[in-house]
Each structure stands twice: as C-alpha cells, then as structure tokens.
Image (cartoon, helix red, strand yellow):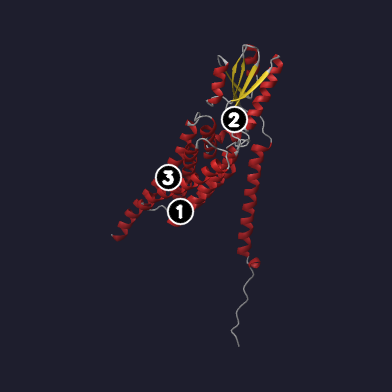
Amino acid sequence: MGRHHPAETPAFRDRTAVCAAVLALAGLTVFVIAMVASYSGAFAKPALHHMSVAVSGPPALVEGLQDQDALQVDEVGDPAAARSQVYERRADAAFAVTPDHAMTIYVAGGGGHSVAAAAETLGRASAERAGLPVVVEDVAPTSAGDPSGTVEFYAVIFVSIGASLGAALLGRLMGSVRSPATLGLRPLSLAAFSAVLAGAVTVYVGPVLGALVGHPWQVFGALWLYAMAVGAAVTGVAAAFGVVASVVLGLFLVVVGNAAAAGPVGRPLLSGFYSTFTTLVPQGSGVSLLRSVSYFGGHGAGVPLVTLAVWAAAGGALAVLATAARVNYRALYGRRAVI
C-alpha cells in the first residue's frame, strides 16, 4: 500500500496566507486611491492660484491686475521687455499696450497650454474692460508632434519608473552597498543604465515621435541627469535606511511627486499644496528642465539643474556614509572578536 500523505491545507484556509493576502490587497487599494486622489486633486479642476505677469501699459491696467490675488504683477517699460520676461521664463505671461492702442498678450505654449489659455483669457478680459483690441503671440510654441505640450511630462514620469526599478534591480543583482568596491561600481552601473534609458527615450520623443526635436543632446542630458537623480536617491536611501525606506520614498515620489510636476496643467494652476513641492521633487525639476531646453533656449534651466544635482548628490552622500559606517563597524567589532 502506498504511504499515506496528509492532505495539504488549501492556501485560502491558511490563516497566515489569508492575512498576508488581505494586507497586500488592502495596501494596493490604498495606493490606488492615493493615486486617484493625488491626480484628481491636482489636475481634475485646475484653477488659477498664482501666475506671474509682466505688464507694460497705463497705470489703470497695472493697478487693475495688481488687485487680483492670484497674480504677481511686474511692471516693465515696454512690449519688448514684457516679451523677454516670458521667453526667459521670468514670467508666465505678459500684457503690453502698444503705441497703436492695442494689447498684445504674450503666452508660452511650451510652458503649458493650460497656463497659456488661462493667461489669454485673463488678458482678453482686461483688454475688454479697457476697450483695447487684442493680439496674441506665443513666444515659445510647442512642436507639431507635441501640440498639447505634455510629452515632456510623460517622458519624465516613465523615466522615473525606469530609474527607480533599475536602481532597485541593480541593488538586487549587485548586493547591498557594504564595501568601497561595491560603492565604486554602483554609480558607474547606474550612470551607464541612465544613459541607455535617457538615450532610448530621447530617440523616441525626438526622431520617432517628432515631439521634442531640435535639441537632442540637451534633451538627452536633461533625461540622463533626471534618471541619475532618481536612481541615486533610491540607492542612497536603501543603503542608509533599508529597503522599506526606499519603498516609502518611491511611493512619495509617485503619489505626490508626479502630481506636483504639473505637466498637464502647469504650476500656476496647481493648488498651494502641490505647487509647494513642484520645485522640490525631481519630477517638477525634470519637466521644467525639459521645457527649458526644448522651447525656451535654455532659459530657466538653472534652478531645475541645481535641484536634480542636489538629489543625485544627496543619494550619493547617503550611500557613502552608510558604507563607511558599515566598514568601520566591521573593522571595530571584528578586531574585538579576535581579541
């Protein structure tokens, strides 16, 4: 007779397995709800909260705009100065009354079509009250392959996924950052992977899609730096505080950082909560940097460049400090064990 084997307990009857599955599904549900709440809160009902406007015109026009709480008004001397403010990314829009008693509304589609549309609506209302005809000029129009001006947002979002997962995979394959040798190899591997990732995305959004064209090396450099910033941050936090901390960082960047990037609507239309993070999270800096090099001739690239460099440097510093602490710990307590 064959040996009798006890029947295996079905997975759904194993309380441990059931509890683990319930917790996992509950966590996934919370994550999905957080994503829905974040994106809907940031993008579903955009409203003008804070727009910088350069104005060249009569005092009555300037004063009327200054009375609006959502506007930060900068009075300039002439229409050329007003236009320069927009192209150099020192203002979101500009209104200028010309000598022939017409108002020119300067917008920048490359900075976000929703922002340009809101600025045009605001300018037309001001011109109507003053009885002035209107001319609209887009000083930084988007390309034919990116008419809505959102390709740079989606490029950054999906490079985020690739950089985060790539850093995690490298950590899994190469092991924890516990020695100077591993520490030296990890950034080289991350830099190489970031170059491949940035290069592939640059080719797609440029020659293939025809969206971000004309400045391929600048687009590549922006995407490479962005991938390095995200990958280094994930690596550094994992090395210093563990995998759980790196997962928490990743969740924060996905839930809050993606929405704060303001890709579909632009920062002036974001609520105060999300706009606070726009210049702090790497996504906001990545989108801003791509727009600067693609549509504004590099103007306004300084702050996002510094922000991404800080994220990358902070991640590297955490990895170095964590590795040094582990090496010193082993050297100290290993010597005591021998004694």
- Considering only order in the chain, which callout, 1 or 2, is on the residue closer to the N terminus? 2
Q: Quadrant of residue 11?
A: bottom right
In three-dimensional space, the C-alpha distance between marks 2 and 1, rounded to whole angstroms, equals 42 Å
Amino acid carrying label 2: it is Pro
Say if residue 156 shows up in the picture. Answer: no
For label 3, the crowd category at 10 Å Cα-Cα, with few meaning under 14, some 14 to 19 and many 20 or more, is many
The amino acid type found where label 3 is placed reads Leu
| Image quadrant where residue 48 sits | top right
Residue, disc 3 = 318
Residue 35 in the image: x percent, y percent? Answer: 63, 45
According to the picture, the residue beneath numbered tag 2 turns out to be: 141
Q: According to the image, label 1 marks what residue?
A: 171
Which quadrant is home to the N terminus?
bottom right
Which percent across, then down, holds residue 297? 50, 29
Taking the view exactly as shown, the residue that stands out farthest to the left is 339
User: Is residue 8 among the parts visible in the rendering?
Assistant: yes
Towards the viewer: 251 or 212: 212
Query: What percent of the width, then of the height, locates residue 126?
Result: 68, 18
